[in-house]
Amino acid sequence: MSETKIVLPDRDIPTKWYNIAADMPNLPSPPLHPATKQPVGPDDLAAIFPMSLIEQEVSTERWIEIPEDVLKAYALWRPSPLFRARRLEEALGTPARIYYKYEGVSPAGSHKPNTSIPQAYYNKEAGIRRIATETGAGQWGSSMALAGSLFGVEVTVYMVRVSYNQKPYRRIAMETWGATVHASPSDITRAGRKILETDPDSPGSLGIAISEAVEDAAGRSDTNYALGSVLNHVLLHQTVIGLEAKRQFELAGDYPDVIIGCCGGGSNLAGVSFPFLRDKINGRELKVIAVEPASCPTLTKGEFRYDFGDTAGLTPLAKMYTLGHDFVPPGIHAGGLRYHGDAPLLCQLYHDGLIEARAYPQTAVFEAALRFARTEGVIPAPESAHAVRAAVDEALRCKEEGREEAILFNLSGHGYLDLQAYADYLDGRLTDYEYPDEKIREALSRLPEI
């Protein structure tokens, strides 16, 4: 029988992260200080980040060593398996070869510990006692809580209110690992209180939760801030996914023609694709697809502009595709994809034509998720199901065109703590929502002029 999964031994955990900034045709524009609008320097970031992460944020070195203590923590679940989705291929009747890298094997059930572990490690090394962060659907908050428990760092999480109510088991997981969790917007911070004064029933957004976490971190000398996506060092840490996948494809005697990842801030797409994109930059044929929800269409409908990373305007301005920092998306179940912007590295690659993007409504996404669960057995996270949808469509394209392409997607997390979303879909309660163009134009009209 041909192999269904390719599993690497512990000795094949990558010992270096890959930094795509060393190979990009064009680097992203520099982040700007929110007050002066001048490029930020290390001193501007030192109030909320350890210097080791700041150095990674600005580095253009191709390879960055992974600390031994981080490798030991990674070994709890890495290397993650690469699966050949043979049963899905058969169900679709496609000549395509479908592979998925399964990050749901981590203790937190997603790819997020790939960066929460090193972030907790570097903060601990810098003498930081406490980390404040935000979370959308809860995967990042769970991962940061896990990392805090492994390295003895206290963690406080501001969880987007709609997800706080939709996903109580995510909150319980965070608390089990020792974190304190607040629904955002909260009455604990100035940013949260200001939102509640305007809209007491605000569902929250990642931008609002980021404002609260940054304010919390900036107000205490023993506290730093940690972000689960968007920043360069976060995408750097996630490249362990693609580096392992390259080795696994070598063992399979194959190479992907198409790579797919869901895209909210961009970390899991970057993680699986960046090591392969180096080959594309050097001339290899490869299609990389970012998949986002139609209700939060950052790449497909946003503008390539400087914008704040948070709602209150506390963070540096980043050049990225954005829907506007005060954009509040509807409460779709894929909470991890409800962000108004995207990682500047990914946005630059998209702007330069090295990545493409598409947006799907959530009912089409869940239809594909059920098809995957009923063939391959794994119930995907709602976020990851966006990648499943695109992989199915690409496989059907191969069927129509008679092309035997290899398709790789990142199954960035499982959905076993998201079963209410599946209950809503199965009971017909999920509705599609495409964000109106006029509302996007209204939000974009309030962007700072740079």
Image (cartoon, rainbow, N blue to C red):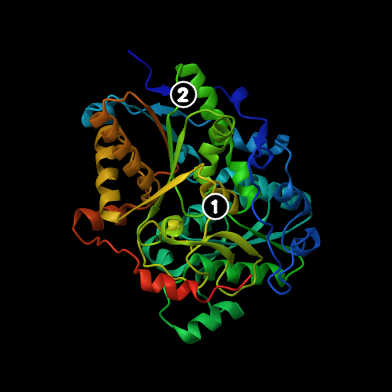
The label number, if any, that marks residue 347 in the structure image: 1
Residue 412, picture quadrant: top left
- Judge from the rendering whether residue 57 lies leftward or rightward of residue 305; answer left or right: right
Vertical comparison of 32 with 264: above or below: below
Picture quarter with the N terminus: top left
Q: Position of residue 133 (x, y in %)?
A: 60, 61
Residue at the far left in the pictured view? 428
Residue indicated by mark 2: 255
The residue lying toward the viewer, choosing from 118 and 21, is: 21
Query: Which three-letter amino acid code belongs to the residue tagged 1?
Result: Cys
The residue lying toward the viewer, choosing from 340 and 401, is: 401
Q: Of marks 2 and 1, which one's residue comes earlier in the chain? A: 2
Dot 1 falls on a residue whose secondary structure is: helix
The residue lying toward the viewer, choosing from 355 and 432, is: 355
Density class for disc 2 (Cα within 10 Å; few <14, some 14-19, many ≥20) is some
**Looking at the image, which residue is at 55% across and 83% down?**
194
